[in-house]
Image: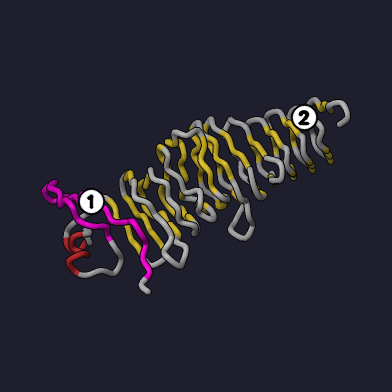
Amino acid sequence: MTKRVKNVRRKKIVDDPRNNNSLIGFPTCVAKVSFLASLLCGVATHGLAPAYAQEASSNIQTFSPSTTIYSSDIVEDNDADPVSVVMNGSGAQILTGTNTYTGSTSVEKGTLGLDGTGSIADSSTVDVAQNGTFDISGVTTGSSSIQSLNGAGTVALGGNTLDITNGNASFGNTFSGVASGSGGLTVSGGTETLSGANTYTGDTVVASGAGLNLPGSVTGALTTAGTTDVDGGTVAGLTTNSGTLTAEKGKLADVANNGGTATLSDTTAGAVTNAAGA
């Protein structure tokens, strides 16, 4: 059975820089296709310069835009195999649809963004390389879910909350980059590690049954009903605990222990209060 990436056909506008005319209506650029298709997709040897290229192999969907491209196309798995998405361009690929592919998402270079109700919630992990940005600032639902977050790049929250639903070491769950914006971050499933100097000002929330390892830092408040370990890390806002909180060589602001267990070792903290019976 021939495998394919489903639902990736669309109309394109390919600019010809020699005369500013446009070749309209050509299909998606696909790697290793015929001479004619290569010509229409703007291969440099034929004198054309497309605004972007989109390449599809049997199990990998690659975006390589040089400008900002908004796409409502849906990327989904093949009949038998998961499909992965790779962003590797100097521009931005903004997804506005509810994508259902279950393979990995790799942002190697450029920006992969979500806008409106766009979603990649079924992808096994989002791996953001140092030169990449994952941007959910355009989401209009207030939050965006991914299964796990990995890499050393940038996450742009805007005013939205990033919800990590299945932090899983098998797929990569250590983020050493920087998440920024006025939004927040929630770990609702699995265990995520944040080892970078994050600058987002919203809350960091760890749900019951979930976990957070924090050798890095967060600027806002931390609310944890799960298992949180601040191992050499910093929480600049109020830490509220109703789960299991441990800190070793950490720096905390005020700590409110509301019925959970908090163990601070060689850690500096502001006011520490325990609720009755805690």
Q: Circle 2 sits in a helix, a strand or a loop, which is it?
A: strand
Quadrant hosting residue 87: bottom left
The image shows residue 262 at horizontal and vertical percentages of 82, 37
In the image, is 260 to the left or to the right of 129?
Answer: right
Residue assigned mark 2? 255
Quadrant hosting residue 258: top right
Residue appearing at x 44%, y 61% in the figure:
83
Q: Circle 1 sits in a helix, a strand or a loop, which is it?
A: strand
Label 1 – label 2 distance at C-alpha: 55 Å
Structure colour scheme: secondary structure
Compared with 181, 193 (above or below) is below
Is 120 or 43 nearer to us in this picture? 120
Residue assigned mark 1? 12
Name which residue type carries label 2.
Val
Name which residue type carries label 1.
Lys
Image quadrant holding the N terminus, namely: bottom left
Residue appearing at x 29%, y 52% in the figure:
52
Q: Residues within 10 Å of mark 1 (few under 14, many from 20)?
A: some
Which range is magenta? 3-29
Residue appearing at x 64%, y 47% in the figure:
189
In the image, is 104 to the left or to the right of 264?
Answer: left
Is 158 or 3 nearer to us in this picture? 3
In the image, is 272 to the left or to the right of 181?
Answer: right
Residue appearing at x 36%, y 50% in the figure:
90
The image shows residue 206 at horizontal and vertical percentages of 67, 40
Quadrant hosting residue 95: top left
The image shows residue 104 at horizontal and vertical percentages of 50, 58
Is 163 or 48 nearer to us in this picture? 163
Q: Residues within 10 Å of mark 2 (few under 14, many from 20)?
A: many
